[in-house]
Amino acid sequence: MYAFTHHAATSVADAVNSVGEGKFLAGGHTLIPTMKQRLAMPGHLVDLNKVGELKGISDNGSVLTIKAMSRHAEVAGSDVVRKAIPGLAALAGGIGDPQVRHRGTIGGSVANNDPVADYPAACLALGATIVTDRRRISADDYFQGLFTTALKDNELITAIEFPHADKFAYAKFRNPASLYALVGVAVAKRGGDVRVAVTGAGSNGVFRWTDAEARLAGNFSGSALEGLKVAASGLNGDIHGSAEYRAHLIGVMAKRAVAAA
Amino acid sequence: MTKVSMTVNGKAVSADVDPRTLLVHFIRDNLRLTGTHVGCDTSQCGACVVHVDGQAVKSCTTLAVTVDGSSVTTIEGLAQGGKLHPMQEAFRENHGLQCGFCTPGMIMSAVDIVNRKGAGLDEATIRHELEGNICRCTGYHNIVKAIGDGAAAMGGQKAAAE
Amino acid sequence: MTDQGIGAPVRRKEDFRFITGQGRYVDDINRPGQAHAYFLRSPHAHAKIKSIDLSAANAAPGVVAIFTGDDIAADKVGGLICGWAIFNKDGSPMRAGPHPALAQGKVRYVGDHVAVVIADTLAQARDAAELINVDYDVLPAVADMAAARKAGAVAVHDEAPNNQFYDWELGDKAGTDAAFAKAKHVTRLDIVNNRLIPNAMEPRAAVGEYDQGTDGLTLYTTSQNPHVARLVLSAFIGLAPEHKFRVIAPDVGGGFGSKIFIYAEETVCVWAARKVNRPVKWTADRTESFLSDAHGRDHVTHAELATDENGKITALRVSTKANMGAYLSTFASSVPTYLYAPLLSGQYNIPAIYAEVEAVYTNTAPVDAYRGAGRPEATFVVERLIEVAARELGKDPAEFRRANFVTQFPHQTPVIMAYDVGDYDASLTKAQQMHDVAGFAARKAASASKGKLRGLGYSAYIEACGIAPSAAVGSLGAGVGLWESAEVRVNPIGTVEILTGSHSHGQGHETTFAQLVSSRLGIPIDNVSIVHGDTDKVQMGMGTYGSRSGAVGMAAISKALDKIEAKAKKVASHVLEASEGDIEFKDGKFTVKGTDKAADFGSIALQAYIAHKFNGQELEPGLKESAFWDPTNFTFPAGVHICELEIDPATGVVTIERWTAVDDFGNVINPLIVEGQVHGGIAQGVGQALLEGAVYDADGQLITASYMDYTMPRAQDLPSYNVGMTITPCPSNPLGIKGCGEAGAIASPPAVINAITNALGHENITMPATPEKVWRAAQSSSHKQAAE
């Protein structure tokens, strides 16, 4: 790691005011490995781990609010989440490994928008709202490509709001080495409205599979997806899976998500 | 330099550290507790697992300054009163280790699994919960057995205490 | 006999320190005043170094010194060596290029060592390294063997203009060709044995230290064979004479071959320690391990098997290309030759065998021995070919094997080996029973009803351990002898120290070697300590690799114990006032035949040192003996593994459902430890078959340079294993031991691939059989209807 200065923020205002040209440090499970490899070199880190107002999970009967510093393990184990959107708890329980889930946070994951992360698919499928220190951003506007979001410099995610759905599930095919998503598909149904979001596969990050949404809107079952294919162009290919294989897996994972929802 | 204070294995410690000091290096270099190991750079192998406030974390991916004020337990702090922890005993009894390098992280993770999942662990659960720990020697067979036995012993110990 | 002796599942003595965090690995060692080394590595696979500008780096904070290949050359530090001479078909020697510890004028792989920065802290060394300005003239790179052997390809070394390091053969070509001409059926197979990265969990590390007062060097290093390291660093690289050079390999966190070799980093650390007169420490991070640990395997083979009208094998013909990487690692040349081709007869009666091997330089990391070293490659060839032949001939694969097993011993193969003993049929039968092969059809039907494909695959392997005798391996080109040494020191109170040239890095020698002593001397294992891994304590040794520590290392201890027993009987004859011929020793007690006179081992040890009861001129006081053991033959562990797995045709995911291993390792010292070795070997072999593979891109960049991309087997990738044994004691060592360290890794890859191809109904799959490959293969399989 390169040298940096460290500030343990005490509040959202303190964090935003002190970050300057630096970066926010949440769970650190993407940022720190990147810094260790000297691929990122922030000169200043504002540590959010002691900011009490960024912690907590609540539900008002129609919207689940998860504060940004909620750890994956907290979301996975939360009775509130399990009751409101059980598939979201299951998703959080499948991120990384147990130790990563003890540190990694929803805010950090959504802020980073890693194309192989799980939460972006849930945000997009559920039509979540990304709440920051200064505004509210719909998931459709928020995710803008690889590691790219609508966040301004020094803008801090404070919470994610997930409106309830009739059905929601996420099915993931893991990269066998890293355990990140090779392909992850999140499916949400609200009445006749179905949203399908795909992570891991897109060369421009998480995306909605609108063809599948249209089919599932009329018939929310795996058989509705029969014969529907995603074009391999625009998908990632690497040693763990070609674009063609990922395209195939999107179909398989979508069916499994529908079955689980 | 930034001042960091924490409790490690029940003992209060504090030091001025470069903010870039990882928890694992604070433990190994400042405290000279070398049972916690570094086996990779990308948070996969789990040789560095310690407990922070009772939860297993990868100390190679955690800044020492971030856990300021926390209570940390390392492999050296697991045995109490000169008596091995049941999970340590189970690893020895089941030949759950060979070269010993991944072992501290395995044992710390195993204790965490029991803390989270209870004492009655089936094989599939143990194997799944070990996804954050890599061993190159044992083929996991005896680690899985050890964790099952260690979990049962921890359960028995807890029941006896209640 | 004690309950801690040979054959007892004793819990390991070494475990207490490991489970309490008190193991002492090289990275745990810090020396007063120590500085830290950081290696600047080549980002290019192939380039000329036009110039290196150190001025900015030298001025950086904390920098103690920066050295490059020029400094190595100026100090006349010798190059890293390859210790086994191989000769081409025409009798000419192998074409070896130089291997300097720091690059001199040229870099040949990504990760090659360009300079070392030594600074007060590691962060300072790394910061300064970024200020070094290297002007490279980037050359075209040959990243694989096909590219390297193409006409007009750039040469990695001038000494091998067409990148062919050697062109070697073994066996009777004419006789083999004649047998093929007469064959009723010929089975042909193209095989890739995928390149692996060893990945011991402890990264390599070194601390070099110089004592100006004594002009002595000390090196703490992650080595499987510290004496060989000292020999090479002293006699060939020339850092210091052996009597002023101490090499210590303390607790070592796994080796699997990768820590046999003498690498640039430890060479530079100990050399630089004298230059800067401070201890110099280096510990690899995992990416450095991926880039610069010697890799394993990487063969491309065409193989053919001839059979007659009765289904008997008549001949085997094998042509292999073996990747050496950019430089020759310490034992690289021997792996695809004498550790490979002599195993091609497998467990079978094959009258004629011919193998030719071409070794190729590429712009990749050096390739050398990795768990099994040549034998997994040979076994994969034989066991895939046998399986495919059986299928082509419409025979049951197990019965086809059985019909061709060697059944008479000793058995001379056409490729050097003389198998001494074995019962291959017994292992196969036991494995089939343990596995419930008879129930496979029902299990397959159950899988099919869930839309899954199920397959079962055999592997009947043989391997050769404890390679020896020294004179024989010398005649084949080995640069060293392959004996082992032992010293037994009995203390006056009857406790025992065993000094051994073997090195334990997970194998449990502190326990098993003590069990031998316990059996022989009738004392508890807690009264025995095993001393190893320090050249100042143990005079000489050859180390641990090739499953040799039991068959060779323990045999040396046994021989020294013979001498102890003989000497102690002499002492006892004086103490018990009887003639030496009447003294008997059993269960730790000396008795006089036909009397009730007795003395225990401890009291005789004390008398040996007190020396009051005998004439010190006629019988030397003390009780200490040493021995060197040079075996009369290799040992030949063999066995049968059965893999049963299920394939999800929708995703290509393979799940191993059942694994049975029945091995014949000869006599077993500690079944707990032996089974543990089998488990670990299977996991590495399954890793090779399903998960692991080093991938370089066409420019020679290593794609799989971290655990983000190199798939390590995890607990959830593996099943529990059913491990059984059959025993035919080995006749070529006094303990009847054959060796167990590599068997699992040798046996398992073909068992997995045979099971996958059995499930798919065709042979078109390569290792690692990743989900995508299996999914594609399932698309073209006859079982496609089972797919989603």
Image: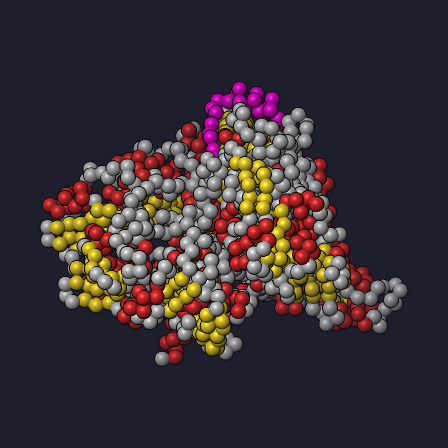
Choose between C543 and C359: the one closer to the eye: C359
C144 magenta-colored: no
Q: From the top left corner, tell me how far across and down residue C611 is, in percent.
A: 83, 70
Q: Residue at x 46, y 70 (%)?
A: B2
The answer to which of C60 and C71 lies nearer the viewer is: C60
Tell me which residue sits at (50%, 30%) in the image: C147
- The residue drawn where x is 20% and y is 39% is A228
Q: Position of residue A186 (x, y in %)?
A: 23, 51
Horizontal relation, residue B71 to residue C478: left or right: left
Q: Which residues are magenta?
A: C168-194
Q: Position of residue C385 (x, y in %)?
A: 48, 33
Front-most of A59 and A174? A59
Whether residue C393 is visible here, answered yes or no, is yes
Q: Decide: is C625 above or below C637.
A: below
Let me know if residue C425 appears in the view. Answer: no
Determine the image quadrant of residue C278.
Answer: bottom right
Q: Is residue C599 above or below residue C211?
A: below
